[in-house]
Image (tube, rainbow, N blue to C red):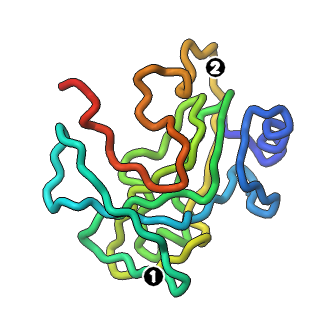
């Protein structure tokens, strides 16, 4: 079940959902709009290795915007820091962003209960497009869950994305054993 605007507001009041900065005008009928943060990043190497720590170069989006190019994976970040303590958050792109040919995530649209951070975006484009800091890029949808949680994400000893940041975070696949 997806939470409605009234349910999202009630969960914010209870402290089960935290969004910083919060702007009431960003609350939709059953979602909350999030915005592109100040930073983007690209990988340094042309060939990525799943067993290696692939390093990134982080840069600030200039005031005049930045033109994303097809064939390049950009890591972005939401302006909003979020916490979800009782619901599963999903991040989806806004239709207006999709209509510009921008995909904001390749696979990582679902958060876990206990996820407390900004969201790293896996951005790709179908044609060159200029993007700007604070432009609306996505919407968070909150799902109710059934049953108790054994271990919240922010309490997992093997969670790889718990360190609070306002910058994109590269893949931590290399920390897995395979």
Horizontal relation, residue 67 to residue 15: left or right: left
Is the residue 107 above or below the residue 154 in the image? below
Of the numbered discs 1 and 2, the one sitting upstream in the chain is 1
Residue at 64% x, 44% y is: 82
Which structural element holds mark 1? strand
Q: Residue at x 56, y 12 (%)?
A: 150
Q: Which residue is mark 2?
A: 146
The residue at which mark 1 appears reads as 130
**Foreground pick, 85 / 166:** 166
Vertical relation: 47 (above or below) 83: below
Q: Is residue 90 above or below residue 104?
A: above
Whole-percent x, y for residue 64 in the image: 52, 87
Q: Residue furthest bottom?
A: 64
- Crowd class of label 2 (few under 14; some 14 to 19; many from 20; radius 10 Å): few
Q: Quadrant of residue 158?
A: top left
Residue 45 in picture, x, y percent from top left: 18, 59
**Disc number at residue 151?**
none
The residue drawn where x is 63% and y is 19% is 146
Describe residue 173's horizontal placement relative to residue 100 as left or right.
left
State whether residue 13 is above or below residue 74.
above
Instruction: Give the CA separation, mark 1 to mark 2.
Output: 42 Å
């Amino acid at each position: 079940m997806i939470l409605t605007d009234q349910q999202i507001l009630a969960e914010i009041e209870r402290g089960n959902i935290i969004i910083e900065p919060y702007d009431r005008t960003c609350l939709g009928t059953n979602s909350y709009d999030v915005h592109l943060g100040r930073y983007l990043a690209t990988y340094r190497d042309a060939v990525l290795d799943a067993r290696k720590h692939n390093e990134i170069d982080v840069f600030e989006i200039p005031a005049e915007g930045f033109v994303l190019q097809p064939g390049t994976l950009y890591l972005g970040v939401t302006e909003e820091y979020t916490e979800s303590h009782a619901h599963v958050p999903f991040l989806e792109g806004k239709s207006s962003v999709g209509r510009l040919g921008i995909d904001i995530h390749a696979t990582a649209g679902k958060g876990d209960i206990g996820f407390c951070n900004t969201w790293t975006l896996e951005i790709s484009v179908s044609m060159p497009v200029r993007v700007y800091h604070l432009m609306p890029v996505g919407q968070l949808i909150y799902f109710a869950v059934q049953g108790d949680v054994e271990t919240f994400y922010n309490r997992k000893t093997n969670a790889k994305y718990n360190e609070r940041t306002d910058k994109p975070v590269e893949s931590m696949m290399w920390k897995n054993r395979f």
